Image (cartoon, rainbow, N blue to C red):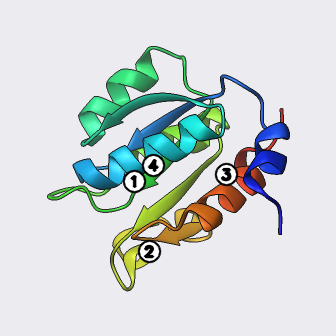
Amino acid sequence: MMQSKDIASGIRKGMRVLVVEDSFMTARGIAHLLQELGAEVLGPVPSVVKAMELLDLGKCDAAVLDINLGNETVEPVAKRLEESGLPYFFVSGYASPKSMLSDARYRRRRLLPKPVEPIMFREAFSAEFGSA
């Protein structure tokens, strides 16, 4: 298993990672983990509209997405990231969160359960975003 230091050394410093998460505490935890890995956090934002606003600025390299954002899913953001060729993965506290996604291509994406375990998060980050 890779140590945090080993993972961080394989990641491009300053990578800008969008965090879309409607739970303040979870968003704060994810942001902290990203900062430990040398990433720059965009957001966190709690909605599709706010995420799209940040994506419109064109300064995003990757994203961590909560699937369920209260009264909406994050699917439009995932679609935009797919179209832009940007890496991302999901987090969710639901037992079967991928069933909330209508497009099957999103169901194949990596999913981390909440609460997010730091070791699993670092491994997912390295696998999905790695060095560029």
- Residue 100, x across and y down, in percent: 34, 72
Residue 78 rendering spot, x and y as whole percentages: 48, 48
Q: How many numbered marks does the figure carry?
A: 4
Query: What residue is disc 4 on?
Result: 30
Residue identifier under label 2: 98
Specify the quadrant that holds the N terminus: bottom right
Q: Which picture quadrant has residue 44?
A: top left
The crowd level at tag 3 (other Cα within 10 Å; few <14, some 14-19, many 20+) is: many
Element at badge 2? helix
What is the residue that sits farthest to the top in this orientation? 57
Task: Tell me, yes or no, whether the two marked residues, 4 and 3, touch with CB atoms within 8 Å.
Answer: no
Q: Are marks 3 and 2 in contact (CB under 8 Å)?
A: no
Residue in view at x 67 percent, y 60 percent: 124
Q: Secondary structure at mark 3?
A: helix
- Residue indicated by mark 3: 125
Q: Earlier in the sequence, mark 2 or mark 1?
A: 1
- Quarter location, residue 91: bottom left
Question: Which numbered disc, 4 or 2, marks the residue closer to the eye?
Answer: 4
Name the amino acid, label 2.
Lys
Q: Earlier in the sequence, mark 4 or mark 2?
A: 4
Residue contact at pointers 1 and 3, CB within 8 angstroms: no
Q: Is residue 102 above or below residue 130?
A: below
Residue 22 visible in the current orientation? no
Residue lying farthest to the bottom in this orientation: 95
Image x and y of residue 115, in percent: 40, 70
Horizontal arrangement in the rendering, residue 25 relative to residue 92 (left or right)? left
| Earlier sequence position, callout 4 versus callout 1 | 4
Which residue type does callout 4 highlight? Ile
